[in-house]
């Protein structure tokens, strides 16, 4: 099984169990789909950093909630009004 598949399976299990385990690494970022256009700049920074190093994976639609032992991953959902920002990614970056 590929690393990305393993990571997605682990993330799905953590969401289903309302739990948290540190999954993010130098090549993996987990972020919610932002509501504001300006917030997409943070996603752009992440992608740019991946492109300028050894690559990486950006998982959108999941957020961290809570603190301490109450910390967990939760689905933040997809925002149809944000689809244009996501489709813009390939035009903004090249390899």
Image (cartoon, rainbow, N blue to C red):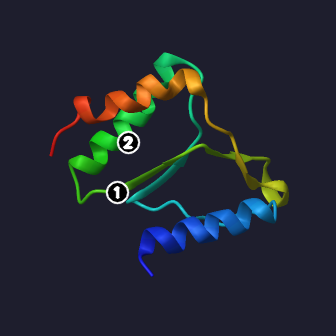
Q: Which residue is mark 2?
A: 46
Residue 62 is situated, as x and y percent measured from the top left of the image, at 63, 47
Going by the picture, which residue comes out furthest to the left?
95
Q: Which circle's residue, 2 or 1, is located before the other in the chain?
A: 2
Going by the picture, which residue comes out furthest to the bottom?
1
Q: Eyeballing the image, is 41 above or below 72?
A: above
Q: Eyeballing the image, is 18 above or below 58?
A: below
Q: Secondary structure at mark 1?
A: loop
**Residue sitting at x 29%, y 45%:** 49
Q: Eyeballing the image, is 54 above or below 59?
A: below
Q: Eyeballing the image, is 56 above or below 85?
A: below
- The one nearer the camera, 48 or 11, is 11
Q: CA distance from mark 2 to mark 1?
A: 9 Å
User: Which quarter of the figure is the N terminus placed in?
Assistant: bottom left
Q: Secondary structure at mark 2?
A: helix
**Residue sitting at x 41%, y 76%:** 2
19 to the left or right of 2: right
Asked if the residue under mark 1 is in contact with the one under mark 2, i.e. CB atoms within 8 Å, the reply is yes
Residue 30 is situated, as x and y percent measured from the top left of the image, at 54, 50
Answer few, some or many: residues within 10 Å of disc 2's Cα (few below 14, many 20 plus, some between 14 and 19): some
Q: Which residue is mark 1?
A: 56
Going by the picture, which residue comes out furthest to the top?
37
61 to the left or right of 14: left
**Residue sitting at x 35%, y 35%:** 45
Residue 43 is situated, as x and y percent measured from the top left of the image, at 43, 35
Answer few, some or many: residues within 10 Å of disc 1's Cα (few below 14, many 20 plus, some between 14 and 19): some
């Amino acid at each position: 099984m590929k690393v990305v598949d393993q990571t997605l399976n682990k993330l799905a299990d953590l969401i289903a169990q309302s739990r948290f385990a540190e999954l993010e690494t130098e090549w993996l970022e987990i972020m919610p789909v932002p509501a504001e256009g300006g917030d997409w700049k943070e996603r752009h920074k992440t992608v740019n950093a991946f492109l300028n190093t050894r690559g990486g994976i950006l998982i959108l639609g999941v957020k961290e909630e809570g603190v301490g032992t109450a910390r967990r991953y939760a689905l933040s959902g997809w925002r149809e009004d944000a689809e244009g920002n996501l489709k813009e990614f390939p035009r903004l970056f090249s390899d």
